[in-house]
Amino acid sequence: MKILVTGGAGYIGSHTCINLLELGHKILVLDNLSNSKRNALNNISKIVNIRLNTDEGKDDVFSFVQTDIRDKESLEKVFARQKIDVVIHFAGLKSVNESIEKPAEYYDNNVIGSINLFEVMKKFNCKTIVFSSSATVYGDCNVMPIKENFPLLPTNPYGKSKIAVEELLQNIFKSDPTWRVGILRYFNPIGAHKSGLIGENLIGIPNNLMPYIMQVAAGRLKKLNVFGGDYDTHDGTGVRDYIHVMDLALGHSKLLGVLMKKPQILTMNFGTGIGYSVLDIVNTFKKVSNIEIAYKIVNRRPGDVAICYADPGYSKLKLEWEAQYTLEDMCKDSWNYMLKN
């Protein structure tokens, strides 16, 4: 089976590529490298011992083309040159805070880009897709854990852009029930591959918690800014459901296996069902690394919510999948990646 992985050089995409290649699939990575690096693909090649091919016209086990999903003409050339069976769609911008500052850019990348992709898929009769959505679509829920049938009330443009793509996929399926559609609402992926060769981007001032902790631990940043210390949680800091990125990667393969059985649309949470606060993460990292993380409580960020964790029961039922890695595993693997990079 030939799988097109959009955004495959990114954090979640690169780890999923490893899993797909290890399972024997052929993959073609499509990425504009705007918030990822080509070197991630070279390291995937080392991990799985499969050569990376950059000849766009050649059908190989592991290939790469640098382009943007907003470039429809380029997308059509990719589909015309190779027979794509499945698309796993990671490509898009992903910062809640940045989306508030640049809402039009987020709709352009995440929504317009997706529309282009789906139209090209239809043109070339490729009707199987797994879409990378987000738990931000739920907004500020008062009831925990979060189930898939909860109201969708995002508090930021990033979450709203994800809902727009979800709704589009639902309408595509209604108009043509021969599609096979998986919509995955991720909670908070952290961790890295055991090899330490790939992990979350460590460049610049991080938007996500774990890379921020890593840079403080490495001495690149003086302290961690903790956004909000007055939430109604056990220690006043925000609580999230953190999931190891390799658990997440395996979940994609499990979902793909279920989708291939028959045309259907499935929407599900990918999380652990456990909520950890920012300071829980800081203290666990200290435990596994023996490094103090200096931090400062600062004002809440616009669009952030106090508590957010999943009910992963539906994904366990449908996919026979559940998270296996512990919070200590996530911190250890993140630090291992930092040490090697």
Image: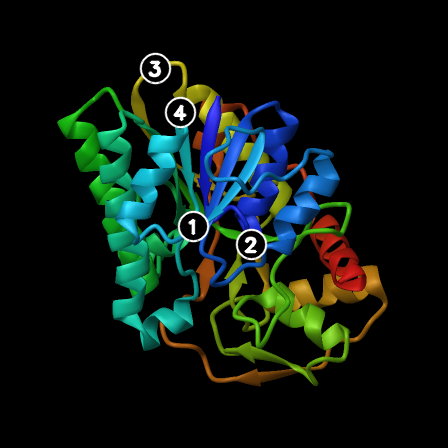
Q: Position of residue 90 (x, y in %)?
A: 44, 47
Q: Name the residue under label 2.
A: 275
Element assignment for label 4: loop
In front of the other: label 3 or label 4?
A: 4
Q: Mark 1 points at which residue?
A: 144
- Mark positioned earlier in the residue sequence (3 or 2): 3
Using the numbered discs, state the Cα–Cα distance from disc 4 to disc 2 in whole angstroms.
Answer: 37 Å
Q: Mark 3 points at which residue?
A: 262
- Are the residues tagged 2 and 1 within 8 Å (C-beta)? yes
Q: Which amino acid does label 2 sit on?
A: Gly
**In-front residue for pair 20/55:** 55
Q: What residue type is labelled 1?
A: Met
Using the numbered discs, state the Cα–Cα distance from disc 3 to disc 4 in whole angstroms.
Answer: 14 Å
Write the residue at 22% across / 39% down.
119
Using the numbered discs, state the Cα–Cα distance from disc 2 to disc 1 in whole angstroms.
Answer: 10 Å
Q: In the rendered image, which quarter is residue 217 located in? A: bottom right
Q: Which amino acid does label 4 sit on?
A: Asp
Residue 332 in view here: yes
Element assignment for label 2: loop
The type of colouring in the image is rainbow
Residue 322 in view here: no
Q: Which residue lies furthest to the top in this view?
A: 261
- Mark positioned earlier in the residue sequence (4 or 2): 4
Q: In this view, does 244 lie to the left or right of 7?
A: right
In front of the other: label 1 or label 3?
A: 3
Q: Is residue 63 left or right of residue 97?
A: right
Using the numbered discs, state the Cα–Cα distance from disc 1 to disc 4 in whole angstroms.
Answer: 37 Å
